[in-house]
Image (cartoon, helix red, strand yellow):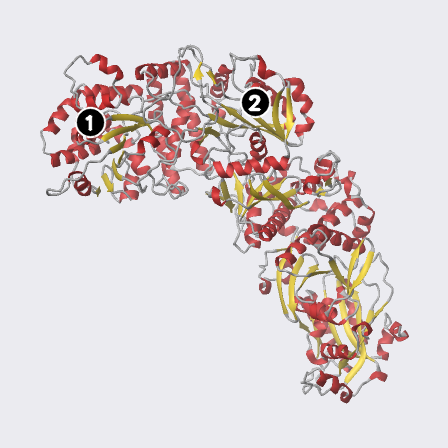
Amino acid sequence: MDPRRAETGKNSDQIQSGHVYHLALDIGGSLAKLVYFTKNDEHIVGNEKKKSPLKASGISNSSRNSPVLNGRLNFKKFETSKINDCLEFINSMKLHLGGCQQPESPGSQTITIKATGGGAYKYADLFKEKFGISLDKEDEMDCLVAGANFLLETIHQEAFTYMGNQKQFVWIDKNDLYPYLLVNIGSGVGMIKVEGDGKFERVSGTSIGGGTFWGLGKLLTKCKSFDELLDLSYRGNNRAVDMLVGDIYGGMDYSKIGLSSTTIASSFGRAISENKERDDYKPEDIARSLLRMISNNIGQISYLTALRFGLKRIFFGGFFIRRHPFTMDTLSVAVNFWSKGEAKAMFLQHEGFLGAVGAFMSSDKHGLKELLANQKVERPPSKLSFSLDQTQVPQQDGELNGDESIECSVYGA
Amino acid sequence: MATKGSNSIHRSSSRPLLDLSKAEIQGNVEEKYPTILLPNQSDDLSHLALDIGGSLIKLVYFSRHEDQSTNDKRMKILKDKLGILNGNRRSYPILGGRLHFVKFETNKINECLEFIYSKKLHCGGWESHHSDSTNDQNAVIKATGGGAFKFADLFKERLGISLDKEDEMDCLVAGANFLLKAIRHEAYTHMEGQKEFIQIDPNDLFPYLLVNIGSGVSMIKVDGNGKFERVSGTNVGGGTYWGLGRLLTNCSSFDELLELSQKGDNRTTDMLVGDIYGTDYPKIGLSASTIASSFGKATLENKELEEYRPEDISLSLLRMISYNIGQISYLNALRFGLKRIFFGGFFIRGHAYTMDAISFAVHFWSKGTAQAMFLRHEGFLGALGAFMSYEKHGLDDLMVHQFVERFPMGAPYTGGKIHGPPLRNLNEKASLENISWMEKFLQKGTEITAPVPMTPPGTTGLGGFEVPLSKGSTLRSDASALNVGVLHLIPTLEVFPLLVDPKMYEPNTVDLSDHSELEYWLTILSEHLPDLVDKAVASEGGTDDSKRRGDAFARAFSAHLARLMEEPAAYGKLGLANLLEMREECLREFQFVDAYRSIKQRENEASLAVLHDLLMELDSLDEETRLLTLIEGVLAANIFDWGSRACVDLYHKGTIIEIYRMSRNKMQRPWRVDDFDAFKERMLGSGDKKPLPHGRALLFVDNSGADIVLGMLPLARELLRRGTEVVLVGNSLPALNDVTAMELPDIVAEAAKHCDILRRAAESGGLLVDAMTNTLDGSKEKLPSVALMVVENGCGSPCIDFRQVSSELAAAAKDADLIILEGMGRSLHTNLYAQFKCDALKLAMVKNQRLAEKLVQGNIYDCVCKYEPAY
């Protein structure tokens, strides 16, 4: 591993060692995600050098007169409630001195940053007032898909399956990626059929999503945070509240219809038959039952939707997942169950940054994708240079704890 | 003494429910309830099946003979008539039976056991005077549902019966298949509070998806009888709603929780698209009020559970679960290419709100290409299926046209809803039970509700994900639940063979789903009620008993009307014909056998007295004038209709003959609908061309008195004279002052005294077996005559539904090439637009202003003479 990659991190001073060129934001309800590019000075590559591969791939670079810069794509997140930290961070990068000036008005001090997520509206005034930064709002779903497409096409170990605590990376042939189903589990669930770059459609969804888990969980337990609720769920046992097939059929499997006695027949179905109050149930059990109910349901509807549109793969993302192993596990089990083992739930390594990456991509001036496409021509996929630089991610906390970066090149603006 | 149905033209192609070969009535027919011995009927035929669920026990049982609500008096009258008819014709009702649907709360299982015991359902269901012991031992009753295991010992102990457990899903599917095949308009859609009944072609039923929403949800793909597979399901079901609901609110029952939802506003708990985007998200076709995240709003606020309204929580839960089930069901139907989705289970069970929510979801996710459907007998699927699992139940072969559904008021257990006190004195003889409920009914007269609970219409205007605009203040917890009547199985009913297209045939011309129309007719019936009660009471000599029953009838029928007013779909798809029949059934239920008996007799006598003069007058006319005069006569005489308010008023002003003459004088052509010339052309031809007379004419007669005697009989005589065989078609059971098939032979016999043509034809038709011994004249001509016959039509209503007629009428129709429908009920309220394979003449005087305006753009007392050559 390249030791330099450890440089990127929480310390903003380190950022300044590189040159920040591009930045994009995804401001969600709970987290604000940043994606930005830093240049490594010693890796500046002249435009001449890059010409030939572009030509080789048949792509005209006539519009590209800028130098190609080698550097890193950095990922960073802030809690939305601490949006000022985020602003400070952006300010510290001296973006107004960087590459984000409007090309058409070089002298102007107006800086425009691509942004997506609900907060892009909500905090627009704040950005403007404080730093004179105007947020250029990109459609959330466009960004999501663009981000996913980019990551799946270019990052080597991006997709993985997760079953029974086993994480397994899946290599996906870029030419055999489409069409796929992207299931974004935020507060609600959007299911998007993706057929190519910019070619996608929201084909389904469900209102039973992360918001339902957290909302109901909050009402039913005394949890103060989503993560706390998740933690609880790991320790719970859903047998206490769920009605299992065995509860109905006296412990025997209802083998006639292929259900084992531990299959959940009715989520929370046990809460009806006993004369118990809410306080008589352990919050852990309730959290567990909720999580399984919601994951199961999303898995089922996703599978049915994929089937309906003949989609080979289902990728799950969104804050509900965010690499929480147990959530991933239940989703995987659901997809496996409903598809009778024929389909597998897949997850994305950079899933939390789909929107931000998509927003980053939405400005075509950095030509990241183009470059990457050509890099791929040069190197075998297994040795793609965009390896992950990831600070350690504890399994218990799904969200990326720290930040990470990917080495890559962009055109200088 | 053996009695066999041996009418010359009787024929039955339908397979009997029971093995009737060598059936005979045991003992003296004078005995009150002669036992019918069916030597070839196997003993194991059982009459009861159970579905014992967690909250309700559902019974389906079959009673084989006429309900014993017939009291002594009625039996006596019937017997009198049978005596007169000399057993030549079948008596009504024909051997068939009734399928009863009854439910009990599972925690009151003792009531259920007592009921079974009192009805002797555990030993075959009918009193077997002659073979007592055999059935009582080791009786096996089919049962399904979780409780079939749980309560097996109890049944064994208390009733000595073993429960034979049938697989739940097998039963569910068998029950659904049976209902969808055999019951007309069993399926319905439910959108924004409106029910719409749907007739599904039984040949185009499979494959379908059956979604059973109990605690969990099972989705079953049904490919045919016994051919099905559980293809999917979800663990988010009724148990989830109730379980989460209990944890989140303080509701103590499912129904309470559901009721709460109707006062809820889910915007306080759900995160809507508008909450996220501040507006619609048109790019993906979501409106601002679309639920983005169920309970998502709770994540944004720091509120305790207690700060949320339980109503809002309940609504949010209801929508979350209903929409989810609707979505997954639709996806599965799509996956397996299933045309229809039927929803059932306790979560549905007639709950208007859950039906609306699920319908909305299916509509939403399918973008309007699919509809959620529900079944009227849905709560009894399992019990019916268990019933079907008997090897010999005979129901498989029954067809739609062999079922008649009725909604008795009194029997406390029928109709699905337990609304009366349970029977007391259960050890009394079964024959007294009906008296027992009647007494209860009379005592509790002021508390009468129709057999099914009421729910105000249009209270479930779920505009989709949006909050309903109008919300009902009250929801009966089991609103329209198990909303079913007693199914009468009449194996001899057949489809009238002369209908051009039985599938497209719709008897009713008045669509009662139009609310103003329904309101009008309900008002008419309501206004007519006091007069009807007077007649009914008078028909039984005005005894105290009859007064009490008259009173009870009035209240009961008013309750039916009130219920219909509130929920037009309460009794399934209802046409005016059904409404009128319901009135007659209700009368019979309160043991009024024939409310107009004395009036009919008096009018018949008065009319017969002048018949001779009329016939003389007719015979003096030339053929063409005579035909016109005859048709005029039918139309004029049709004024005597006690079903018409206007005519009832008229009667108080003059004698029958005066009115008849007045009515005839008013006949001025052209009539409002006047095809007389075409009819005359067919009958008499033009110029030298003499057409062949018809071979056989079916005359559907209407009222007693002048109508039959001075109208239809002379017309029949004319046809007979021209060499056309005539079959008079009368009602099987009395309805208002309509002449019944049982009364017709008497009238014909009396008329025959004045007329040789009628006499010879009646003799030839076997109508005068008795009368012949009275005629002394030996100068009987040896000339063979075309026959005059009488058949019953199979109904007890002033209207006729040609999808369900008696087998003898169907048989008589085989050779008929002319049918004449007379009177408002049979040719205007129903059948005005019916098309027949033979020539058809529809004659009626319109005695209702609204109907006149609606159907013929005319006025009251306008006449209709509609002639249509064979299609």
CA separation in Å, label 2 and label 1:
54 Å
Please report the residue visible at 77 percent of the width from the left and 55 percent of the height from the top.
A328
Q: Chain of mark 1?
A: B
Q: Chain of mark 2?
A: B
From the viewer's perspective, tell me whether residue A413 is left or right of residue B496.
right
- Look at the picture and state if A126 lies above or below B696: below
Position in image of residue B567 (x %, y %):
47, 38
Q: Which SS class for mark 2?
A: loop
| Front residue (pair B367, A224) | B367
Label 2 packing within 10 angstroms: few (<14), some (14-19), many (20+): some
From the viewer's perspective, tell me whether residue B230 is left or right of residue B94.
right
Tell me which amino acid carries mark 1: Leu
Question: Which residue corresponds to mark 1?
Answer: B710
Label 1 packing within 10 angstroms: few (<14), some (14-19), many (20+): many
Q: Is residue A357 visible?
A: yes
Image quarter for residue B656? Answer: top left
Quadrant of the image containing the C terminus of chain A: bottom right
Position in image of residue B240 (x %, y %):
68, 43
Tell me which amino acid carries mark 2: Asp
Position in image of residue B443 (x %, y %):
49, 19
Question: Which residue corresponds to mark 2?
Answer: B44
- Look at the picture and state if B133 lies above or below B278: above
